[in-house]
């Protein structure tokens, strides 16, 4: 089994967290999420992670550790992940300060992690 950690930011609290992802049947799935300090994430090399896949959550995936959101978005500007507040029609990338007006579900993701 191949596993890795992708960094994400909370869309409500602008805090960084890690998402543990596993390669299953030639695709990546989200299995766990946990708060992490950006400096520690960089020391662990989590800011270098790049993966491509559907990133579906498995049963029991807890979602964002700060707000509980289960859905995620990828910024088309910087390629980084944030949890998605479904109540908002406009999203904001806390990585690159980009406003995202059109939020669409994506079948597959090409995710870059970190980069402070």
Image (tube, grey):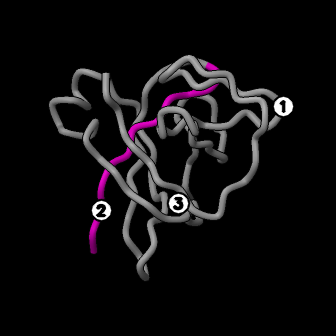
Q: Quadrant of residue 40?
A: top left
- Tell me which label, 3 or 2, sits earlier in the chain: 2
Q: Is residue 2 left or right of residue 107?
A: left
Q: x, y (%) of residue 89? A: 84, 31
- Tell me which label, 2 or 1, sits earlier in the chain: 2
Q: Which residue is mark 1?
A: 89
Q: Residue at x 38, y 65 (%)?
A: 22
Nearer to us of marks 3 and 2 is 3
Of residues 74 and 23, which is closer to you in this image? 74
- Tell me which label, 3 or 1, sits earlier in the chain: 3
Quadrant assignment for the N terminus: bottom left
Q: Residues within 10 Å of mark 1 (few under 14, many from 20)?
A: few
Q: Which residue is mark 3?
A: 55
The residues tagged by marks 2 and 1 sit, at their Cα atoms, a distance apart of 33 Å
Q: Which residue is mark 2?
A: 3
The residues tagged by marks 3 and 1 sit, at their Cα atoms, a distance apart of 22 Å
Nearer to us of marks 2 and 1 is 1
Of residues 115 and 46, which is closer to you in this image? 115
Q: Quadrant of residue 100?
A: top right
What secondary structure is the magenta-colored segment mainly?
Answer: strand
Check contact, mark 3 vs mark 2: CB within 8 A.
Answer: no
Q: Secondary structure at mark 1?
A: loop
Q: Which residues are magenta?
A: 1-12
Q: Secondary structure at mark 2?
A: strand
Q: x, y (%) of residue 39? A: 23, 21
Q: Is residue 50 above or below residue 116?
A: below
């Amino acid at each position: 089994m191949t596993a890795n950690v992708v960094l994400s930011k909370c869309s409500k609290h602008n805090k960084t967290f890690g998402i543990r992802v596993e390669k299953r049947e030639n695709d990546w799935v989200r299995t766990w999420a946990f708060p992490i300090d950006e400096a520690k994430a960089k020391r662990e090399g989590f800011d270098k992670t790049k993966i491509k896949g559907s990133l579906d959550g498995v049963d029991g995936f807890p979602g964002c550790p700060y707000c509980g959101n289960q859905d995620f978005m990828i910024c088309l500007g910087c390629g980084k992940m944030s949890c998605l507040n479904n109540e908002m029609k406009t999203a904001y990338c806390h990585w690159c300060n980009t406003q995202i007006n059109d939020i669409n579900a994506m079948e597959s993701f090409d995710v870059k992690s970190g980069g402070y």
